[in-house]
Image (cartoon, rainbow, N blue to C red):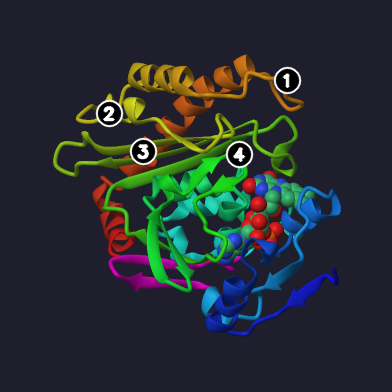
Amino acid sequence: MKFEYWEPDSIPAAMALLERYRERAKILAGGTDLVVQMRRGIMRPDGVIHIGRIPELKGILPKVEGGIRIGTLTTMREIEKSEILQSGFDILCQGAAQVSCPQIRNVATLGGNTCNGVPSADTVPALMALGAEAILMSPAGERSVPLEKFHNGPGRTILKGDEMLLRFKIPAPPPFTGGCYLKYTPRGTFELAIVGVAALITLNPRDGLCENARLILGACGPTPLRVKNAESILLGKRRDKSLFARAAEIAAGEAKPNPGVSVRASAPYRREMVRVWSRYALEKAWQKAEAGLDLSSKFEVNKAGNA
Ligand SMILES: Cc1cc2nc3c(=O)[nH]c(=O)nc-3n(C[C@H](O)[C@H](O)[C@H](O)COP(=O)(O)OP(=O)(O)OC[C@H]3O[C@@H](n4cnc5c(N)ncnc54)[C@H](O)[C@@H]3O)c2cc1C
């Protein structure tokens, strides 16, 4: 059978192709995952639908429905450099900045990083920490899925055969929120994460106690993992190193690294790095949230909250 390449210039045109070919066709965004998989023979679609010419799928829109909207085709480089995201959503910039090298970041998209479904994807923990929702479209219409429920297993997502990711919707973080994404690799960003940790902390401006916490682990299980038990022990507490150590201990205990042989790192090693990295990430996120409690920077933080 002849291999097909389509380049629709609108969402309805892409939808018509997806409805007709379903799983036989793959969506092509930046191609940094898909083309590699096709070259290796892991993926053998009958054709690809390149969505790069659909303008509605691109860009970052502030002040939409109490938050921001990021099109699926927005590249890692655009996210890393975005001024809109720097205020309040910078944990996502940190994630994007740690994807490989500038050449890859110039073409790799946020949507592709999510839809590819690997547990080491650097932007997914940050999106989950921010409470992002994925807006999907199929011939039956649009639906919205919290990112926390998007991944089913390594390389598997809830996307149906005729469905496409359009954009992400991210609520504006409350004032006095700080975030930190840390990626652990022995050789810098060029490698996939051995462990990725996203921490987001919101403090109560009246007493400085922790009002909300999110801790998400990447590359530590079949899907990115939210550690709710570690989050809950932080609530209502004041900053304290032993508190971070306890939360990190819980995170290490709940991490589910693959016990099989891995070329990148053994399960015990990953668990140990979760312990270390979670502690650092929580402390850093807390410090950032606290910086907002300083009256001199209150205005900036409020601006972030209302972005
Ligand atoms: C050398 C190299 C280094 C890398 N390093 C890193 C790294 O450090 N960290 C990291 O996280 N990743 C890394 N990656 C992986 C990759 O760059 C990212 O996952 C990237 O964000 C994928 O985006 P893309 O636009 O290239 O996706 P594509 O390759 O175009 O697509 C990936 C998958 O998502 C599907 N898809 C894409 N868009 C949609 C959509 N809108 N709706 C439905 N399905 C869709 C495709 O069908 C495909 O299955 C690396 C890749 C390479 C080649």
Magenta region includes residue 64 = yes
Q: Is residue 206 above or below residue 231?
A: below
Query: So how many labels did they put on this image?
Result: 4
Q: Which residue bears the numbered disc 3?
A: 214
Q: Which residue bears the numbered disc 2?
A: 232
Residue 52 horizontal/vertical position (percent): 66, 75
Image quadrant in which you'd find residue 236: top left
- Marks 3 and 4, Cα distance to the nearest angstrom? 22 Å
Q: Which residue bears the numbered disc 1?
A: 261
Magenta region includes residue 26 = no
The residue that appears at 65% across and 70% down in the rendered structure is 21
Q: Callout 4, which amino acid?
A: Pro
- Is the C-beta of the residue carrying label 4 under 8 Å from the nearest atom of ligand 1? no
What is the number of the mark on residue 154?
4
Q: Callout 2, which amino acid?
A: Ser
Q: Residues within 10 Å of mark 3 (few under 14, many from 20)?
A: many
The residue that appears at 84% across and 49% down in the rendered structure is 40
Rendered-image quadrant of the N terminus: bottom right
Sequence-wise, the earlier of marks 4 and 2 is 4
Residue 159 horizontal/vertical position (percent): 52, 56
- Marks 3 and 2, Cα distance to the nearest angstrom? 9 Å
Q: Nearer the viewer, mark 1 or mark 3?
A: 1
The range drawn in magenta is 58-75
Q: Residues within 10 Å of mark 1 (few under 14, many from 20)?
A: few
SS of the residue at dot 3?
strand
